[in-house]
Amino acid sequence: MKRFLLAIFFSINLGTAVSALDMPLTDVNGNKVNISSYQGQWIVVNYWATWCPPCIVEMPELQAFHDEHSGKGAMVLGINTELIGKQQLQEFLEDYFITYPIFVSKPTQESELGLIPGLPTTFLVNPAGKVVARQVGPVTQAMIEQFIQKWQEE
C-alpha cells in the first residue's frame, strides 16, 4: 500500500523543473520575503484553506514533517489561500498547533510554482530552488520523506 501511495504522491511529471526562487511570499503579519530565503533545503509548499477538510486532516502530518526536518535540510511553508482576517487565521493556527511558517494569498488557481486545481495542493522544491513535484490532495509525512529519499537516490 505504501508503494502505491508513493506512486500517487507527486504523480504529475513536471517535465522541466520550474524555478521557485523568485516567488514572493507575504506572512500573516504582512512581512514580505522571497522563497529564495529558504534555498538550500527541501521546501514543502502547501496551499490550503481553513474551510477545507482534507487540508485540516493533513496539517498534523505536515507539522510532524516540519518538526522532524526543520533545521536539518527540509521544511514546510503553508500558504493560506482564502479571504480571512488576520486574527481569525492566527486563532485557527493556534487551535491546530501549527508552528511552521504560514503565508497568505488571495484565492487562486495558479502560482509561480504551477497550477493549483484544488485544495490542498502541495509542491516540492529541491535545494536548488526547482519545483520537482506537485500533489493535489492530502499528503503524509511518510509520503514526503519517501519521495525525497527516492529523488536523492536518482
Image (cartoon, rainbow, N blue to C red):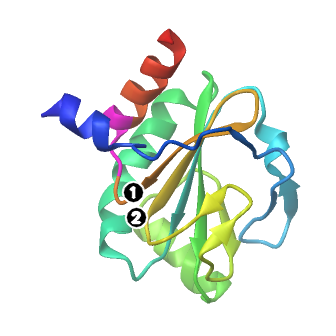
* Disc marking residue 5: none
**Amino acid at circle 2:** Tyr
Q: Is residue 142 magenta?
A: yes
Please state the horizontal and vertical placement of residue 95, each as a whole percent of the image: 41, 70
Q: Residue at x 43, y 19 (%)?
A: 150
* Disc marking residue 96: 2
In the current view of this chain or complex, which residue is farthest to the left?
1
- Rendered image quadrant of residue 78: bottom right
Q: Say if 134 sits above or below 47 in the image.
A: above
In the current view of this chain or complex, which residue is farthest to the top?
153
**For this rendering, which residue is in front, 107 or 53?**
107
Q: Say if 147 sits above or below 134 in the image.
A: above
Q: Say if 88 sits above or below 23 in the image.
A: below
**For this rendering, which residue is in front, 85 or 121?**
121
Q: Is residue 32 magenta?
A: no
Q: Is residue 24 left or right of residue 42?
A: right
Q: Is residue 100 left or right of residue 5?
A: right
Which mark lies nearer to you, 1 or 2?
A: 1
Q: Which residues are magenta?
A: 139-143
- Rendered image quadrant of residue 64: top left
Q: Is residue 20 left or right of residue 11?
A: right
In the current view of this chain or complex, which residue is farthest to the front?
15
Mark 1 or mark 2, earlier in chain: 1
C-beta proximity under 8 Å, tags 1 and 2: yes
Mark 1 closeness class: few <14, some 14–19, many ≥20 residues within 10 Å: many
Please state the horizontal and vertical placement of residue 116, each as a whole percent of the image: 55, 67
**For this rendering, which residue is in front, 106 or 19?**
19
At mark 1, the secondary structure is helix
Please state the horizontal and vertical placement of residue 38, each as a whole percent of the image: 77, 38
- Rendered image quadrant of residue 43: top right
The residue tagged 1 is 59
